Amino acid sequence: MKSWSPYKNHRLFVGTVFGVFVGLTLLIAVQPAAQIQANNAPLPTAEALTAEQQAGLRVFIGEGCVACHTQQVRNIDMDKAWGGRPGIPADYAWRQRLDVWRATPSTLGSERTGPDLTEVGERQPSDLWHLLHLYQPRSVVAASIMPAFPWLFEDSVAGTPAGLALNIPAAWRARGSQATIVPTRRAQQLVAYLMSLKQAELPTGSEPAFLALSPPKAEPAAALGTPGVALLPDGAALYTTHCQACHQANGEGLKGAFPPLKGSPVVNDKDATLMVNIILQGYNPRPEYGVMLPFADKLTDAEIAAIVSHERSAWGNTGAPVTADFVKQLRALVQPVAAL
């Protein structure tokens, strides 16, 4: 008689172990990875890497550059030198597997022995500077501790474009050497990748040009059955002016950058306190999205109430409208905190 005890049936034991392994893999690794991939996408302004830049990325990884250089701008003051804004998931959503055998390259890094490279293509837009820096870092940055990469260069040969020849200072040449130094194909690819490192621009949320010519009038909205709501300005026009650039006209936001308002549990909550407080104070506790700046000093109580009421009734949302008095009460509570 076959035993159903895993301690007496080795096939059952191995099968149980394998089943638990597969289940945990799906739960801990596959499902979160699929969710992250579904919830992120490159910014509309992001430019895909060319074939030359993709090859340079492989050189960047192969030469171990990630060991000393990060590509992540944190939301702290000391990182402002490395980029115009903190990094967000959308900045890295374009990354794909190198091929069937090699995983998606991670260039975020964990050490910052050298400067962050998030916007090095913006800070230093000269390809010749980058080539000199790779050949001998101290020829352009005296205090650099970066190792030289001479194997990425060679003596000039017939047919090499003259524009690629490097003007190497005599102090960094072999004694008596008059050879013309030119970059190899791999060096050119690496520099092409470095030159591509520029942060994609985020929507600013500022007033669109077509609205600046004819600003929305503060006309009363249609009565929504709540006292005080009928006296609010046009929430749809205010949303277009102040919110649409980030959260989009359809309320679906931008994956990996700005959260959707359509179907949002915060927007549809019976209590609109959290939603109003976010608009008043800004919001930055969710690493999967960019930072939302506060609007307490930019919008009146009536304007905030109009925007909130519009968002809570648009795109299939079912939240109740709010009044200017409701916003005024919350503003009185958050102002002392903001003053600190």
Image (cartoon, helix red, strand yellow):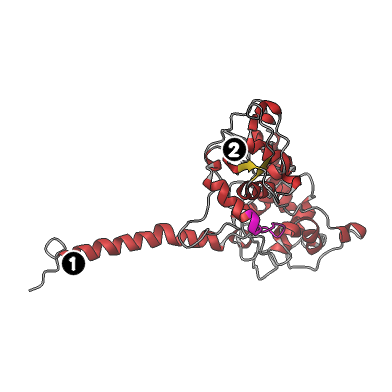
Q: Residues within 10 Å of mark 2 (few under 14, many from 20)?
A: few
Q: In which quarter of the image is residue 80?
A: top right
Q: Which residue is drawn at 56% across and 45% down?
A: 108
Height in image: 225 above or below 66?
below
What's the mark number on residue 175?
none
Residue 126, position in %: x, y? 74, 42
- Three-letter code, disc 1: Arg
Quadrant where the N terminus sits is: bottom left
Q: Name the residue under label 2.
A: 150
Q: Which of 95 and 27 is in front in this view?
A: 95
From which residue to which does the magenta span run?
Answer: 43-53
Whether residue 196 appears in magenta in the rendering, the answer is no
Distance between mark 1 and mark 2 Cα atoms = 57 Å
Residue 110, position in %: x, y? 52, 40
Asked whether, in this view, residue 306 is left or right of residue 291, the answer is right
What's the mark number on residue 11?
1
Height in image: 35 above or below 340?
below
Of marks 1 and 2, which one's residue comes earlier in the chain? 1
Numbered disc in front, either 1 or 2: 2
